[in-house]
Structure formats: C-alpha cells, structure tokens
Image (cartoon, coloured by chain):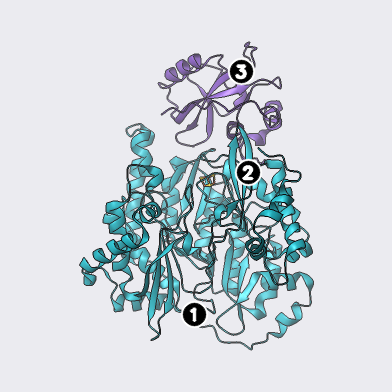
C-alpha cells in the first residue's frame, strides 16, 4: 500500500486464481504479478490505468479467472474495497474469522474488518464486470 | 438402502476420467474459461467468492455411515474441515481447488458418490421426505419412487438441455416434509379407494423471482405410469418452455402463461401419444428396487420403553424427546432429527469430526442410515427408544444436541454474502443473531413452531418465501437491508409469504423477529401456532410490532 495517490477513491484489480480458486489482486511489487494479500495490491488512481495493467497481466504465467476492477475507499486512512462484497472476498467469510486471508491478521486486515461503517451511505459501488 | 450396480459405477467413473482430462486441458490453457465453465458446472463445480465450490449430490437425501465418512474425509483432506448441507439435501464444499477436483471426484466415485446433475438445465437431485420408510403416515416408501426417477433422469438424453433447471420432490404422507408444492413437479403418493398406489401430480411450483405454489395437474395417476406421465410433462416443457428469457424459462411461467387447464390438456395429449411399454417401469424392476429399500429387520419393541420414560424425567432429554424425536412406524422406535442449528452455529454446516461421529452413532443406533433434510438438518430414521438417551449423550458430546426442531432457532439460511457470488447480503450472521434471541429454551418452546427462512438474494435458496417469517437480503445503495415476509409455508398448507413493510437494516432484523414472536404471544388463541395467528389476524398487529423502532428504507 505504497501509493502516493491521496484522493479518497482508487481502483484495484481482482480475480480468482485458476487452479486454486483463491482471491488474488494485481500486485504492486511488479507488473503482471498477482498476490493473495490485499495489502500488497497495486492501487491505481484511474480505471484506465487499472485496465491497462490488467491487459498487460494477460501474458502472465499465473492464470486467473473472472478478473475485474474494484473501487477502493480511503476514508479511514487505509485503502479498503468500497463494497462489503469485495471486503469479504479480501478477508474470508465474516462468520469464520479463522479462514481465508483474514486469519493472518495485521493492520490492513483489521482496517478491512472495521471498514463496515466507512462505506455506509457512500453510494453504490462500481463493479466493472469483465469476461 | 439402494446400492449402485455395475452400470451406475462405470457411468460415474467414466465421467471422472473425462473431467480429469478437461481440467488438465483448462490448466494447460488449451480450453478457455468460456469453453470450460459449462463443463465444470456439469460436474457440480462453481466459482464462488473465495474460490471453487463443489456440490455433491445426495440422492433423495439418503446417506449411509460409509458415505458420510467419505464426505468427512473429503472435508478434511481437500477442504477446510467442514461441509454445508443445503435445502436441496445436497452437500457443498466451499474451499476446493480446481486442480484437485478430479481426485476428489475419483475418491467420491469409490464410495458411489458424485456431483452429476447438481448444476445445469437438467433434472436435478430428486428430494423427498427425510422420514421416508420410517414415517407412520406414509402410503409407501417414497425412496423407491425417487430411485425410479433417478435412474430415468440420470443423463437422460432428451432432458439434458431443458429451458432451465428442473426440480422434483416426492412425498407419500399427508404431512408434507418435502415442500413438494415449491417444486417444478411435486408428487404425492397415496392410495385410491381400491387401495392401489396413485400419484397426485402438482406442477409449476417454484421460488425465486416469481414464486408460485404448484397446482394439481393430475389426480389418481396409477403409480406404475409415473415415468410416462413425467415424460409427457417434460416434453411439453422442453418444447414450449421459454428459452428467450432466463427469468421466464421455468415451467411455472409456462403453466401460468398457458393456464393450468390448457397446460394439462397438452400433457394429456402428449401422454396419450407415448408408448408406455417403452417408458414405464416394469413390475420386475420396481420389485428389484423396492427390495433394496426393505427395512432391515426392526423387531417391534414394547410400546413403552422403560429406559426412555425414565430418561424423560431429565429436563434436557425431555426437551430433546419432545422436539427432535418423531414417532416411527415400528413400535418402540423413533425418528431422531439432529439439529445443525445450535446457537452460534452456521445453519447446515457440519465439521468432518461431527460427520464421522454421526456416522458412528448411526452405525450403533440407526442401522447405519442417515438422511439430510431440506431444512438443513440430519435424521437418524430408525432409533430404538431404548437407545435414545445414549444417542442424545453421543450428540451432546459433539455439540449437536440442540432440541430446537421446527422452533425459532431452527433457521434455514443460504450461504449468502459470506460465500455466494450472487448474494446481495449476508444470511448466516442474521440467522445467528436471531437464534441468540431464542437461546432461552423456555421462551423458545413457549413460542413453539416458528419457521424462519433466510435468503441472501432473490434466487431464494433459503426458501424465504415459505418461511412463517421470511427474510430476504437486498442491497440498498451498497448496504445490507432485509425484506421481511409473513405467513409463508412449505408444508401441505403451502403459501407464499406476504411482504410486511419496508426493508429493515441488518442490525434490526433480530429485533424484528423477536418483536413478531412477542406480539404473537400477546395475541394468539389457545392451540394456535404462529402461522395460524398470522393467518387469522393478518399483518396489521405484526407490522406495528416491527416498525415501532426499526431503521427502514
Ligand atoms: S439465495 Fe442467493 S445468496 Fe443465497 S445461496 Fe442462493 S444464490 Fe446465493
């Protein structure tokens, strides 16, 4: 989460890994890399930049399914997915805190868990479905 | 219990080999997701929020101890140690890997289990009364007829690409424990004046976006003509069902657009033109299937079990006996329902350890037989009352002795937004919050029969339309809200619940349900169930109870 962008909206790219099915995000570490840790996700300041990165990632050896862009929110000082659906994907089931990425804990996981109220009344999330 | 023959086994194995090859080609990149998706769905493999979900078929909800142990092994080795029983009497694993699915299916095939026809526009798993073969009030064992339907519908070449999915449910009792009126076809088996087995055939029931209660299309169908009559219905549907609009493709829409009489006329014409000798089941084959379901010898026991009566002086066991044990057709036995709805539990979830322990208990006390109910519980159908206390203690040791069957905390809930890619809102935490309000068993029993059913979206997997109190998750500007319905029923008095008023916020749903229950206690007449009071008084007193405080939109 090292983006220098300081608006309160941004975009990330998510998908599920083809073989394992786990939720992944385009990573900030290098172009075309995917990560299962939301805290390591690349933060794009526009959908256009996110789309371009997603196109470039098609050449990656790591195969994913159902890639799409998600809207992020920074109102609590940490980037978190705006929609509850995407926070649950990034964390795991809210009813099984020992399962999914949330099990490892940490500052970003806690921020995602606390983000419940941050997204309240913030308008419908923009889920851009891609093939 | 029905045992697979060589044909069943080779069919399932061939399918596993075929899918292994398809998965390899997908992982190597020679099949695109677009090409592969229908293939994986045909094998019960869905992509959900956190990964792949495998839906394993449990034909008419009947399991042996050996099969339940096999499912426990899959949960432990390839999943995260648990599975989720669904309202279709199936089991879902939420955390499997695509790359490992062929191994899982191969392992399941060794135990005569598979995931065929758990997805797609085909005839899905036929469901039935979980008390089948043990219920006092049944005209025949409905499992026999479910197996007849299973054999006929498995990979049926004509009915593998219907306009939409197709669900059949069968009961042989006046009391409907299989929600037959909420199915594309509902079958009620009974006897005519001469004592012959006949079906009442209901058609066009279904939930989802446009809920319908099934309507009677044929009375007194001779039981041995079942398959030709089903074929006639399916042919009319296959030919005339709407393929142009996903939301109008179920048979319920065809029946309501044509009108019941016109639809029935078409079916009769089709039926008259069929050659029954090609389709209807032969008496010898029926006898062979029937033989496999013959009740293993249950010797009648004394009408009064001394041990059982003595144990009932214990309050906890008495409560369990009252709520979870139903009368059995053989004297001295009971049908025990195991609640998967303890306070704080996820409705329908069962851990691998629990599955194995239940398999052991079934082996000791229920002839190794287990049933899955559409209410997401399990049933041990053949328990001697003398053994009931030992079974209760065994269940208590694994945290499954909740004495709440058909009470307010015995909630049906779909996976909702915690797992499901189609969800608008969560269902499980709502169920858990409601159950906590009824934690005091004295209060819960005072309220009595109260069926709460929750779906995370309009697809209605949680049967919310049929809840005495139904709860539907909706998305209002990115927030979870819940629409309440009142007065639904999935039983013989089936009805679609009516919307009570504006949707309430997630944090207010448990308050609303508790308020409804308390209002019922204030206004009920003696012997009235919650549903009866709602039907007598209508929504007004209940509306007032809910909307006094709730945050609504
Ligand atoms: S009702 Fe909707 S949210 Fe619930 S399991 Fe079915 S599709 Fe998913």
**Colour applied to chain B:** cyan
Q: Name the chain letter of the residue that bears numbered label 1.
A: B
Q: Residue furthest bottom?
A: B302
For residue B48, side relative to residue B288 (left or right): right
**Does label 1 lie on the same chain as label 3?**
no
Q: How far from the left and from the top, in percent, is residue B451?
A: 63, 59
Residue situated in front as seen by the camera: A114 or B169: B169
Question: In the rendered image of this protein, does residue B27 appear above or below residue B497?
Answer: above
**In which quadrant of the rendered view does residue B425 lie?**
top right
Residue that carries the numbered disc 1 in the rendered image: B296
Q: Chain of mark 3?
A: A
Mark 1 vs mark 2: in front: 2
- Residue sitting at x 28%, y 61%: B266
Which numbered marker is on residue A44?
none
Queried on whether the Cβ of the residue with tag 3 lies below 8 angstroms from ligand 1, the answer reads: no
Structural crowding at the residue carrying mark 1, measured as other residues with C-alpha within 10 Å and reported as few (<14), some (14–19) or many (≥20)? few
x%, y% of residue B36?
36, 38
What label does residue B482 carry, if any?
Answer: 2
Q: Nearer the N terminus, badge 1 or badge 2?
A: 1
Q: Which mark is residue A9?
A: 3
Label 2: element kind: strand
Residue A123 appears in the rendering: yes
Number of numbered discs visible in the structure rendering: 3
Depth check: B427 or B257 in front?
B257
Q: Identify the chain of the residue marked 2, using the numbered disc in the image.
A: B
Above or below, comparing residue B314 to residue B44 in the picture: below
Q: CA distance from mark 3 to mark 1?
A: 66 Å
Mark 3 or 2, closer to the camera: 2
């Amino acid at each position: 989460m090292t983006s220098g962008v300081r608006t309160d909206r941004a975009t990330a790219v998510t998908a599920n890994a083809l073989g394992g099915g786990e939720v992944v995000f385009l990573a900030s570490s290098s172009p075309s890399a995917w990560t299962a840790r939301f805290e390591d996700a690349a933060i794009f300041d526009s959908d256009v930049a996110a789309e371009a990165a997603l196109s470039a990632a098609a050449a990656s050896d790591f195969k994913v399914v159902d890639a799409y862009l998600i809207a992020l929110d920074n109102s609590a000082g940490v980037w978190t997915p705006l929609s509850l659906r995407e926070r649950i994907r990034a964390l795991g089931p809210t009813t099984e805190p020992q399962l999914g990425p949330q099990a490892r804990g940490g500052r970003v996981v806690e921020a995602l868990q606390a983000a419940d109220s941050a997204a309240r009344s913030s308008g419908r999330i923009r889920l851009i479905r891609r093939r | 219990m029905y045992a697979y023959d060589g044909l069943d086994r080779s069919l399932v194995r061939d399918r596993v080999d075929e899918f292994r090859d398809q998965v390899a080609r997908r992982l190597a990149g020679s099949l695109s997701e677009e090409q592969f998706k229908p293939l994986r769905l045909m094998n019960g493999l869905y992509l959900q929020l956190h990964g792949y979900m495998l839906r394993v078929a449990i034909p008419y909800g009947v399991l042996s101890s050996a099969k339940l142990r096999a499912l426990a092994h899959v949960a432990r080795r390839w999943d995260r140690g648990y599975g989720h029983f669904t309202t279709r009497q199936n089991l879902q694993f939420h955390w499997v890997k695509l790359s490992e699915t062929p191994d899982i299916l191969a392992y399941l095939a060794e135990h005569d289990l598979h995931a065929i026809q758990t997805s797609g526009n085909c005839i899905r798993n036929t469901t039935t009364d979980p008390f089948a073969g043990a219920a006092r009030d049944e005209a025949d064992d409905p499992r026999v007829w479910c197996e007849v339907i299973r054999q006929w519908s498995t990979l049926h070449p004509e009915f593998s690409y219907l306009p939409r999915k197709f669900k059949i449910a069968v009961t042989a009792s006046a009391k409907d424990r299989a929600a037959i009126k909420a199915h594309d076809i509902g079958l009620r088996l009974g006897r005519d004046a001469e004592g012959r087995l006949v079906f009442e055939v209901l058609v066009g029931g279904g939930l989802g976006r446009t809920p319908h209660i099934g309507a009677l299309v044929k009375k007194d169908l001779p039981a041995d003509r079942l398959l030709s009559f089903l074929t006639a219905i399916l042919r009319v549907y296959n030919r005339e069902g709407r393929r142009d609009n996903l939301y109008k493709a179920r048979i319920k829409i065809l029946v309501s657009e044509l009108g019941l009489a016109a639809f029935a006329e078409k079916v009769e014409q089709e039926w008259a033109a069929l050659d029954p000798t090609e389709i209807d089941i032969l008496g010898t084959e029926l006898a062979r299937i029937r033989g496999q379901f013959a009740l293993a010898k249950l010797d009648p026991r004394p009408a009064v079990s001394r041990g059982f009566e003595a144990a009932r002086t214990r309050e906890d066991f008495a409560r369990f006996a009252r709520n979870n044990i139903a009368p059995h057709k053989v004297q001295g036995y009971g049908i025990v329902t195991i609640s998967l709805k303890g306070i704080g539990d996820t409705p329908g979830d069962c851990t691998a350890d629990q599955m194995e322990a239940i398999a052991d208990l079934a082996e000791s006390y229920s002839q190794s037989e287990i049933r899955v109910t559409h209410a997401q519980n399990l049933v041990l159908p053949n328990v001697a009352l003398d053994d009931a206390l030992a079974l209760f203690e065994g269940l208590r040791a694994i945290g499954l002795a909740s004495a709440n069957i058909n009470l307010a905390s015995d909630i049906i809930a779909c996976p909702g937004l915690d797992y499901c890619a189609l969800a608008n809102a969560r269902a499980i935490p709502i169920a858990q919050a409601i159950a906590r309000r009824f934690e005091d068993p004295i209060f819960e029993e005072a309220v009595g029969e109260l069926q709460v059913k929750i779906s995370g979206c309009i697809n209605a997997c949680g049967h919310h339309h049929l809840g005495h109190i139904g709860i539907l998750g909706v998305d209002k500007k990115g927030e979870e809200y819940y629409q309440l319905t009142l007065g639904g029923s999935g039983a013989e008095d089936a009805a679609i619940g009516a919307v009570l008023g504006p949707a309430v916020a997630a944090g207010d749903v448990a308050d609303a349900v508790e308020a409804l229950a308390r209002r019922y206690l204030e206004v009920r007449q003696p012997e009235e169930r919650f549903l009866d009071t709602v039907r007598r008084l209508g929504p007004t007193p209940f509306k007032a109870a809910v909307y006094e405080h709730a945050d609504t939109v």
